[in-house]
């Protein structure tokens, strides 16, 4: 890695919730090592662990000192690329993480403010994706599970730095949706199966998001 | 075309409702001319016209005398491949067709029975798609628009023949979902954008459906 | 009961699926014995049992020889009063009935046609409900569980008689929705809680449906 | 009004978006003047106006110096009582307010923090509602329209005071849902009609929310 080549840290969560894969992880792996607009993508996994995620974030920032941070997570039920606007200082989940922990109304950071704005150029990314025919929306909540903890955690640690940082939720891939259909328990509630998006399109969307972020932030 | 090579008639509707394309049409075009398990796919468009669809069905059956008929249509809002079980003798729609006609509680066929069962091997198709990681569901209603009229129309005309016949609804492609996002009018109702599926996956799904149909119907 | 007073048979399903109540049953009880436009409402429960429902329908028709039949069932997840247009000759459910039976792709009637039209004045009922500010929709599928079996079963037995007959699906009541919220298992899928409708409004809606049916069918 | 009787300021938005009413407004009117656990409810309307809402909030706080502030707004499409956890410093809406203004990515407060936590006892309210059979959920976003502006605005002005303050989103009432059904334009997208909740139940829910708030905050 050239010393002067700026780094984009791209994180993707490991599988969780009993699913056989995670498109966030797969997208991170697909883009790891790629060069986008002169920036080197360093892809790294994040554990679905409320106990460990903070230390992992610290380690990644210490190791790579990235110029840009984009994190990826799966949003089951989401039909489109979802650009998160804000991370909340809150962990609240009944679905156990990969170490079996749950959380109820807990702050992520004792002294932390209620919320922190993602600092990616979300409107530019949104426009670029729509121009390419990729469905996308902005979102005012990243949930209260590990994805939000990741977003808030990075934003808190980077608050005094000019490092664009944000989180992108992605839909299930078709194979995960098919898996969910096979596994579902019928409870009499009439529901549609989960929507999905192909991994190729998710990777393309994240590549565009990175490109819009670094080309906008990079001086000529 | 060899005289002895059996024919699968694959229809796909033209664009409608102001959309720039129709994945049903695109899938039909993609598979036209392909040979699947010794069967030749003949792809033909159908007009989104309640006045003309019956004559078009007549003409297609007369011209091709197919051994199998599978029709494709778009179901905006649908997240997965949707295998229709039944066609209803009913036309009822407020969204005008491509000639501006609407319909209210009208039978498609004066003497026709209330409904006709699709005769494709739907459970085999469902299982084959899920095995390939393609999300799918069976459906008890093909709606009351042109798609249902197509299904009912073919089934009525083929009722005394051993010709497997059915209808597959497909999701929007991502570009159409993006188009819908751009065009939407905000009415204050909180709604998710429409789900989508890549054209490649839709084509793969329809190819599997054809293969399961013709390999099952063909004697050794 | 006066000999000349015509009878409306109003059925409501018992609770099922582990729920503590069923608004279809409660509505049937609330209206039992009421006189609407000179017609006497006879409310009777139906068992959620695929093995027993046919005999129950036979018994009820034999005992009451009703001039009108309206059946009620719960549609979990449904937000509005849902007027069923058609019963399908199909039983297909993985959620066990109250005797633990499931069904897969089975016809309800060996010789029966694919589907039968409900014979209530659905458009009049729809208009009357909307005029009273009660949300309603027509539906092309009553599902493939006991509700559909009830509708198809009554329609088949009454096919040669001028007895208006149909099925109305109703939403959960708020207490059942609250119960579902308390019981839910978090699977990571982001879903809204089920919609509901107050029992009072459901009862009012069914009363209007009965009134529209009998006043339309009754000669001056 | 007794000098020593504490005041709950209960606001409700006026109708907007072309709807004929607003259950938030109607609930506010229904509870205005009621005494709950020794607290007097003062109900006041709020304008759906991004230009005027700040001054209205100032005036109300100046006039009533309330011990508790609860604001109500309509969430079309929402099936249950929705307790908002957080207000965002963001106004972003394409649906014009009642003066025709729209907003795009604008902060509500120049110096304000990204978000502020509602200070009602939300978990107690949630538990009390579920115990009474009223469906409810907590929410991490109050949207980016006037409702959120109201919540953020009150929280900002009350930040140094021990005044419990929050926002409750309520579903459409059935009459508004029926109105939406009548008015809808068919665009070919298959969607369920909006869910609703009776005004009586909404009023009961808000009464419980007030009671839980003031009984918890009141010293013996």
Image: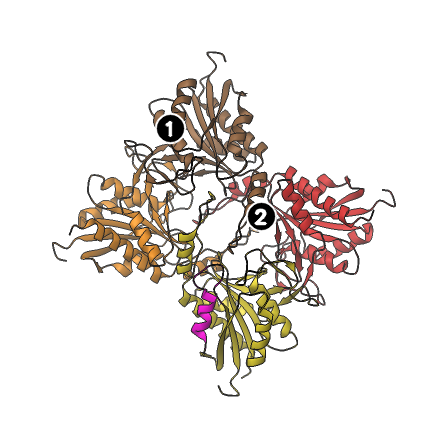
Chain colours: A yellow, B orange, C brown, D red
The numbered mark at residue D76 is 2
The residue under the point 43% across, 18% down is: C64
Which mark is in front, 2 or 1?
A: 1
Asked which secondary structure carries label 2, the reply is: loop
As drawn, is A129 to the left or to the right of C113? right
Disc 1 crowd rating (10 Å Cα; few below 14, some 14-19, many 20+) is some
Q: Do pointers 2 and 1 mark residues of a single chain?
A: no
**Residue at the (53%, 29%) spot, across then down:** C27
Looking at the rendered image, the quarter that the N terminus of chain D falls into is top right
Q: Is residue B80 above or below residue B115?
A: below
In the picture of the structure, the residue carrying the numbered disc 1 is C54
As rendered, which of A179 and B17 lies closer to the eye? Answer: A179
The stretch in magenta equals A14-32
Q: Hey, which quadrant is residue B21 in on the image?
A: bottom left
Tell me how far mark 2 sits from mark 1, CA to CA.
Answer: 42 Å
Residue D80 seen from this side: yes
Q: Mark 1 and mark 2 in contact (Cβ < 8 Å)?
A: no
Count the marks: how many?
2
Q: Is residue B153 left or right of residue C182?
A: left
| Residue A202 place in picture, x, y as percent | 44, 66
Kindly identify which chain the residue marked by label 2 belongs to. D
Q: Is residue D30 left or right of residue C164?
A: right
Left or right: where does residue D18 sit relative to residue D110?
left
- Image coords of residue C212 (percent x, y): 49, 26
- Of all residues, the one furthest to the left in this rendering is B3
A97 or D104: nearer the eye? A97
Q: Chain under label 1?
A: C
In magenta segment, residue C101: no
């Amino acid at each position: 890695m050239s010393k002067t080549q700026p780094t984009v840290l791209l994180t993707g969560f490991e599988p969780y919730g009993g699913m056989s894969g995670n498109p966030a992880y797969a997208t991170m792996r697909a883009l790891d090592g790629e060069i986008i607009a002169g920036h080197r993508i360093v892809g790294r996994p994040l554990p679905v662990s409320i106990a460990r995620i903070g230390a992992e974030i610290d380690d990644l920032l210490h190791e790579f000192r990235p110029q840009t941070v984009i994190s990826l997570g799966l949003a089951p039920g989401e039909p489109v690329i979802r650009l998160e606007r804000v991370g909340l200082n809150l962990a609240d989940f009944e679905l156990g993480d990969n170490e079996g922990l749950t959380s109820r109304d807990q702050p992520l950071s004792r002294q932390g403010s209620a919320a922190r704005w993602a600092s990616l150029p979300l409107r530019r990314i949104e426009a670029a994706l729509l121009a390419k025919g990729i469905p996308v929306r902005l979102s005012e909540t990243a949930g209260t599970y590990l994805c939000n903890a990741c977003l808030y955690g990075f934003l808190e640690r980077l608050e005094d730095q000019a490092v664009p940082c944000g989180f992108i939720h992605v839909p299930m891939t078709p194979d995960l949706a098919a898996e969910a259909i096979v596994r579902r328990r019928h409870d009499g509630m009439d529901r549609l199966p989960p929507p999905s998006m192909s991994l190729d399109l998710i990777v393309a969307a994240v590549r565009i998001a990175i490109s819009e972020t670094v080309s906008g932030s990079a001086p000529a």
